[in-house]
Image (tube, rainbow, N blue to C red):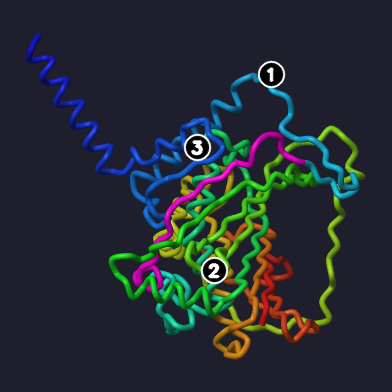
Amino acid sequence: MIHLIFIGAIISIGLALTLRWTGITSLVPLLRPSSITHVSFPSTSLQGARFWTVFIYIIAASISRRLSISGRRSPWRITENDASEATYRLDGPTVSLSMPFRIRRGDIDKYARAVTANQATITHEEILRPPHLHLLLSALTEPAMLLLLSTRTCPIDPVGTVNVRNRFELTRPLACAQRLKDCLRNAGDGGGDLSIIARLDQDVKKVKRGWEYRVIVDLLDEKGEDPVLYRQIFTILQFHKHSCSTSIFETEVSDTPKSLLEVGKLHLTANDPKSWASFSKDYNPIHLSTLAAKLFGFSSIIAHGNHVAAKAVHHFSLSDRLEDDKQQEESWMEVEFKRPTFLPCELKIQRVDGQSSSVVQLQIGKGDKINLSMKFAH
């Protein structure tokens, strides 16, 4: 009997040490029934056992949610806005998650390799300027969004949702870049007073295919004049069949461009998502495994949308550099995902002509189909 107790104690201690060593214990705050969550590890550490624990938990929670019969009332209520805008609000407190931010030179190196595929060089200085800076910071802060969707109090079921568009904002690009350089110079710090906070916007939009939620992610500098260094807004579609008339849904208006100028071509392989996953920590199996992609109903591996955007920006930047005097101005970028990019494939990058000289609009697609469209301040 004593031997069994001793063996049990050894196993328990070993299990506890293993959980601590793998970092899984740091995920416990996600399970607490609180609308405000804080995790202690930095955004770049969502990998390995931590990521797969979160992924399995999301799948299990989704299955449990779909099988359970709940008597809860609908989490939406209509706002005072005009009903034609199809805008609703979530009941309850704002759901948020905060975590430390870290950046290393290795992160920038990974971005460079993922974007250039070792074909054309890109310097750290170029990456720390818009438009690349938008996509660099998007990937480095995205783990906060993934963890927010994993919290117990988040009303969104991540399984089956689709990221339909992103918006990135830099109010002071030079100040943000300088703050990041300060972090890079201090190898033992890597972030210091920088942190990330992700929150679920309580405004919900009713669209034809379901509900559109917005997750707002801010990179904060507690010591800065303006605490928000960078902001990205994820718009996520959760599919839902509405019982009411479709007449209230917003009608999409497509602007026919005057002309399209080809900028270049993207040659994407099935191995490309691995480099972006290593950098962004988005190890979703549909990007990495053909079998997993097929299990989720796709014909093959799907490229990361922001990876395609970053590659397109790199091709455009090779022929059209942003003037230095414009680096001080407020900068923004919008990316809209029209359809999945199945790999391997070749995509054409086209610039929409007839736009303002201060705004670049690109379309990336195959044939007459657009996979992704983007525009940014230039």
> Circle 3 is placed at which residue position?
58
Please say whether residue 353 is one of the residues in the magenta stretch.
no
The residue type indicated by label 3 comes to Ile
Q: Which mark is residue 216?
A: none
Q: Quadrant of residue 91?
A: top right
Residue 109 image point, x, y percent: 38, 73
Give the spatial CA distance, label 3 vs label 2.
26 Å
Q: Is residue 110 left or right of residue 253?
A: left
Q: How crowded is mark 3: few (under 14 residues within 10 Å), some or many (20 or more)?
A: many
- How packed mark 1 is, by other alpha carbons closer than 10 Å (few <14, some 14-19, many 20 or more), is few
Under mark 1, the amino acid is Gly
Residue 119 in view in this figure: no
Q: Would residue 96 be counted in the magenta stretch?
A: yes
Magenta segment boundaries in residue numbering: 89-109
User: Quarter of the image holding residue 331?
Assistant: bottom right
- The answer to which of 202 and 283 lies nearer the viewer is 202
User: What residue is shown with label 2?
Assistant: 135
- The mark that comes first in sequence, 1 or 3, is 3
